Amino acid sequence: MLQGLTSVCFQCSVFILNPTSMKYALPYIFLSVLLVLPFGSRMFAQGSMGLTGHYAQPLNSLDAGNYRWGGGGALELFTQGYDFGMPLRLQLGGSFGYTFSGQESNPVELQDFEGVMVDQLTRNYSLAFHGIARFISPEARVRFYLDGIIGSRGFISDQVLQLEELGSFNGDDCPKNEQDNINTDWTLVYGAGAGTMIYLTEGVSLDLRATYSRGSRASYVDLESVNSYANEVEYSMNQTFTDMLLISVGVSFRITGCDGSMSDGNGASRSYKGSESSRFWRFSPRNASSPSGTRRALGPVRKY
C-alpha cells in the first residue's frame, strides 16, 4: 500500500515539475477553475459576468512571422471583490476566449474523381484560458480598472476540405467536410490591461479595455506560404513568441444572489424581497406554559 502511494506521489511530482506536461495541463486547470468556482463558491453570488468581443493584433516576432490579426470573443466571470480598506477594490475572475486569425482557400483536385475540384481551407485560430486579478475604482457611473492576467493560450492550425460544396454526387448523400489538425501548441501567457466600465442601466455596464499579453513560443502555419498543386497543399511552419494586443468591447452583467440581492459594488448588498424594517420571528419549543403542538411567537430576534 505504502509502495503504491509512493509511486503515485512520484509520478505526480514528475508531472508537476515537467514544463512540457504543465504547458498542456494549464488550459484544463484554468477551464476547471472557471467552470467550478462560479457554481461552487459563494464569492460569485454577488459578482459579475462579462461578454466581450475583441480585435487581436499580433506583436513583435508573432507579427514578423506572418501571423494575421484576428477577432473573437470571451466569457468572463468575476467575484464581487474585496476593498481591504483601500479606494480600489480587488476582484478575482477567469476568462475563456476564442480568436480567429485568418485562413487561406485553395482549389484542390479530388484523388478519386479526376477533374473534380473543391476548396481546401487552411486556418489559424486560438483558445485562451486566463485567471484575472482586477483593481477597480468604487461604484460610479464611470469606473476605471487595471488587470493582471496569467493563463494559457492554445495556437491551433488546421485544414478543412470543403466536400459539402459538391452537394449530392452521383446520387449519393451529400458528403461531410473533412477536418484535419495540422498543429496545436499551448503557451504560457501573462500580461496587463486597463479599461473602463460605463453605467448603462441597473446591473448592466459597457466594458472598454486594452490588454497586452506576452506568450511563450508556439508553432503555427504561415498562411502567406500556402499554395496548392493538383491534389496537394503545401505550407511552411513558423515558431515564434506569441505577444498580442487585444482591444475589447463588451457588456458586463451584475449577478444577483440566491436571496434576490444585488451587490452595490461597495461590499454591501441591496435586497429586493422586503424592507430592512421587516420583523423576523422565531418560535419556542413546546413547554408547560404553552399547549402541546402550539408555536408561540417570542418577538424579533436580536443579535448582541
Image (tube, helix red, strand yellow):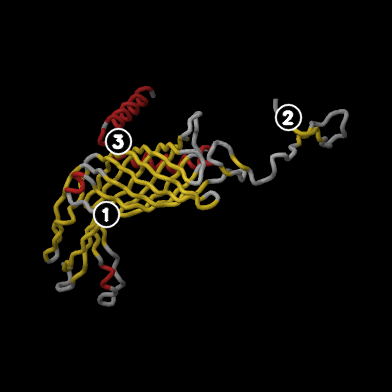
Direction bottom: furthest residue = 171
Q: Nearer the viewer, mark 1 or mark 3?
A: 1
The crowd level at tag 1 (other Cα within 10 Å; few <14, some 14-19, many 20+) is many
Q: Earlier in the sequence, mark 1 or mark 3?
A: 3
**Disc 1 marks which residue?**
101
Kind of residue at badge 1: Ser
Q: Earlier in the sequence, mark 2 or mark 3?
A: 3
In the image, is residue 277 above or below residue 6? below
Q: Secondary structure at mark 1?
A: strand
**Disc 2 marks which residue?**
302
Direction from residue 168 to residue 273 in the image, left or right = right
User: Mark 1 to mark 3: distance in Å?
Assistant: 25 Å
- Figure quadrant of residue 179: bottom left
Which residue: 35% across, 38% down? 149
Q: Is residue 75 visible?
A: yes
Image disc number at residue 22: 3
- CB of mark 1 within 8 Å of CB of mark 3? no
In the image, is residue 29 above or below residue 233? above
Kind of residue at badge 2: Arg
Q: Nearer the viewer, residue 271 or 16?
A: 271
Image quadrant containing the N terminus: top left
Q: Nearer the viewer, mark 2 or mark 3?
A: 2
Q: Nearer the viewer, residue 282 or 268?
A: 268
Image quadrant containing the C terminus: top right
Kind of residue at badge 3: Met
The percent position of residue 154, horizontal first and vertical second, equals: 29, 46
Q: Secondary structure at mark 3?
A: helix
